[in-house]
Structures are given as C-alpha cells and as structure tokens.
Amino acid sequence: MPPNTLTGPGTDFTGPLRAVVGEYDGCIWIPPPSFFCTTATLTAQRIAAGDYAIRRPAAAQTDVLYTSLSENLLGKYGTDPLKLNSNYGVVPDTIPNPKPAANSGVFGATGSYPFSSGHAIRGFQICGAVLVYRITTAAPTSFTISFYRRKQLNNAAPTITTDPGGPYTVNGVAGPTSGFVLTAQANRYSALIVFNTPYTIGFNDRNTDDWFELSVVGTGTAVVDIMGLMVLTNYNLL
C-alpha cells in the first residue's frame, strides 16, 4: 500500500501492520524438555554435545506427546488500533528522532513515522512449523499431529477447538498423518507443516491457550526421539 494513501489526522488503521511497514517473519524453537506425555515415561537424551532430544521409549501402545504454543508465543488481546500520523507521506521529518532514513523503503519516502500513537506489537500469527524427530530400531505404526485451542470458562467445562487454523499440509501432503516419513534410521527427519491460512495465537480472546499434539502409535520396538518443534510465525500484526 503506497504511503501517500495513508493520510488524514486521527485515522485508525486496523489492518495488518505489515501492509504499511513490510513483512516481519520469525520463528521460535520449542525444545525437547517442553514436551510432555501422560502415558509414557519420556527421558532426556544427550545425543552429542549440543544435540539433545526427548525420547519416547519402545512400547506397543498409543502415546500423545504435547506442548504449549501459548507459553512460547505472544498472543494478541484487545483492540488498540494505531493512529496514522497525518503528516506521513506529506511533510518530512515531523516525528522526533530516532526515525528511519528517508527513502529507506521501510517507513516511506519522507522519513517520518507512519503512526502517531498505538502499539506495534500485536501478537504472533502461526504460519507453520517444523517437527524434528528421529526413529530408531523399528518404524512406528503412525504419527498424527493436532493443533488445539482451549477456552477457559468460569464455573464450566472449557471449550476445545480442534485445528483452529484450519487445513494444513505435512511435507506437502494434506492432513495430519500421511506426510510423515516413519522409516527407522540413524539420521533425523525434518517435517514441514504449512497452514493454508495462518492463524493468531489466542484468537484475540482472554483465558485462551493453544497446544500442539503428536500422537504416536507405537510397536514394541519403535523408539522415537523428538528434537524439537520450530514454529514459523508472522508478528507485529495489528
């Protein structure tokens, strides 16, 4: 959106901030100790110096490993639109230092800030994730992932939303199961999860948190190591 279209004193800008100042991409690594399981005893593994994992031992049963996304990612809550600086794209150097250089390609051609008030940090939007894992001894029967959103209610059971971001692919294959490679080997796998439509942590609601689950249907000899989950994000969203 060209800077000179965003003028007018007191104008509320309620779209994504990246539409004005560019795309801000990031990622957060959720490490092995952040995974939990209630049906199997997970053990910490030091594979080598600087290389760690959490191990789900061999067992002919189904185990669900889970981790919190809300603990690691800033959620969005409340309505706080930014006020456009009425001089943005019109009069240069109207906002006190520090300010970006003129023609920087970030804040417009004049070097003035686009906003006069409001908050820039507006939470994280999940675009996808990368699950890093290793399978040794034998292949498990299946991997199935799920994303959940929990809404805590007063004096009532919570409401649970499954896959709040909608459809996604795993290694380019639609759905939560078929895209995973499950062959036992010494090297690890890196499975790319991509959402068709990114979604915002917390859904701009209070008492709400988001979770990731991995269901492992095991055999009596399949050992699964989880090295971590890298969550791919957009941030600075209004």
Image (spheres, helix red, strand yellow):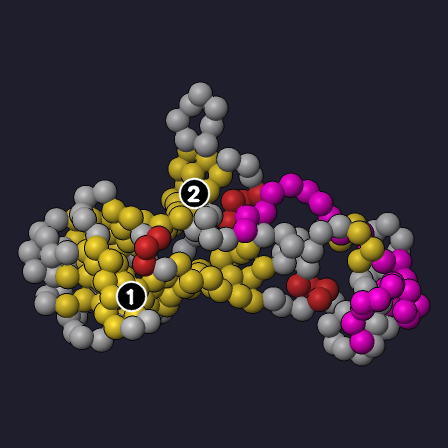
Magenta residue check for 135: no
Residue with the most extreme top position: 155
> Which quadrant is the N terminus positioned in?
bottom right
Q: Give amino acid for label 1.
A: Tyr
Q: Quadrant of residue 18?
A: bottom right
Q: Residue at 89% of width from left, 58% of height from top?
A: 86
Q: Residue at 71% of width from left, 66% of height from top?
A: 21
Q: As displayed, is residue 40 above or below residue 4?
A: above
Q: Residue at 41% of width from left, 31% of height from top?
A: 158
Q: As displayed, is residue 178 above or below residue 187?
A: above
Nearer-the-camera pick, 163 or 134: 134
Q: Mark 2 or 1, which is nearer the eye?
A: 1
Query: Does 60 sit left or right of 101 as displayed?
Result: left
Which dot marks residue 134?
none
Residue to which mark 1 is pinned? 52
| Percent x, y of residue 12 | 79, 50
Counting other residues with Cα less than 10 Å from the Cα at mark 1, is it few (<14), some (14-19), or many (20 or more)?
some
Residue to which mark 2 is pinned? 149
Q: Give amino acid for label 2.
A: Arg
Assign the magenta stretch its main secondary structure: loop
